[in-house]
Amino acid sequence: MSVDEPLSASCAPVHAPMAQFGRRDGELLVGGEPLSRLAVRAGQTPFYAYDRGLLRERVATLRTALPAAIKLHFAMKANPLPALVGFMAGLVDGIDVASSGELRVALDAGADPHEISFAGPGKREAELRQAVASRVLVNVESMREVRLLEGIASELGLPARVAVRVNPDFELKGSGVKMSGGPKPFGIDAEQVPGVLDQIERSGLAFEGFHLFAGSQNLRADAIVEAQQKSFDLALRLAVSAPAPVRFLNLGGGFGIPYFPGEQALDLAPIGANLDRLVARAKTELPHASLVIELGRYLVGEAGIYVTRIVDRKVSRGQVFLVTDGGLNHHLAASGNFGQVFRKNHPVTISKRAAATQTEIASVVGPLCTPLDLLADRMALPVAEVGDLVVVFQSGAYGASASPQAFLGHPHCIEILV
């Protein structure tokens, strides 16, 4: 469906309204700027645009819905654009990184090293060295990391701040990406954690707490509530074996955003109420601990769009194809991630200088020589011509940095913060 032309209730499920961006005379506004003018400012298509006002608004919404005692961390893997990370660093309480490259960006952005945590199952020795030298918290994911950190801390004469990333014995139900439960490369199996805690104590590392991340992209508040409760209870059990009081408890995130027809926005109210209860419990059961929620997609995903220009309009055996100057190479997720079995359309529209009155069924395809280069498959869209701008919503997370931009040698896209 088009976000301009909702289908009738009798038709198939429709996308949730993309009401976060305003319009003027039918043209989309980003940061108050008409999209056609923004394209000139960007200097090219395709490009990603991220709206500062929407980023600020999302953090404010979370601050209102969640207890004041909860710390918000931005998982910058969702969008590592340095300008955006710098902006987010001023809004949230901490940054979570997953490589030494991300660590450099976070530090350059002015994030407080004490509130930076470093996770990832394959940290190289050089990365661990950088983390200790930067005095950030390392979420250890194996006994190997513990042993390496012992030597690095001794060599540098600095304490190695550590939390244990735990692979729980449960998963986040309804999660788009499951990160826990069963065999996983992430974290340390819960039943092995007491032995790792013993090694941390013998190695003289500065233990601070636990990191539990059960999954991501979940739109079910009840599943998130259940995972948070189980994570808290598991941390309590593991704390008995800890060499020091728990001062850091990352309960993960998992908050999703609606991408596909029939999906609805996440209800924050039950999550906030549950976290109120956990904060109250922590005051007596983990009195030294700060509770952290780690969010990436939920913070930035809805504040960004991908914009590409129509360079050709073709009709093949009755089907309309709008050919654009960007596609799979810039926005892998919208194309279906190199051929998902059941591909679904992201919300897409045509941004025109005048309000569109007619619609048609059309497919939006990119310039790559593969049938997988598909941004919209037979969607009801405003009638479009060469030169019009195609907009893919929900594009603020896992966009440019998560796409194969070198594929087939086409130009890279750019990213702007408005």
Image: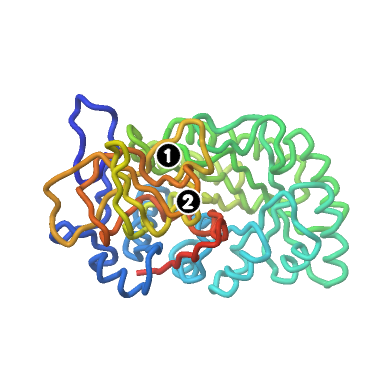
The three-letter amino acid code for the residue at tag 2 is Leu
Percent x, y of residue 354: 13, 59
> Which residue is depicted at the point 52% across and 38% down?
339
Amino acid residing under circle 1? Ile
Judged by depth in the image, the label closer to the viewer, 1 or 2, is 2
Mark yes or no: residue 243 visible: yes
Distance from label 1 to label 2 (Cα)?
35 Å
In the image, what residue occupies the spot 32% across and 75% down? 41
Label number found at residue 45: none
Report which residue position mark 2 lands on.
328
Foreground: 93 or 240?
93
Q: Position of residue 276 (x, y in %)?
A: 44, 42
Residue 366's spot in the image, x, y percent? Answer: 41, 52
Where does the C terminus fall, quadrant-wise?
Answer: bottom left
For numbered disc 2, what is the local secondary structure? loop
Protein image colouring: rainbow
Residue 251 position, x and y percent, is 57, 44
Secondary element under disc 1, as helix, strand or loop, is helix
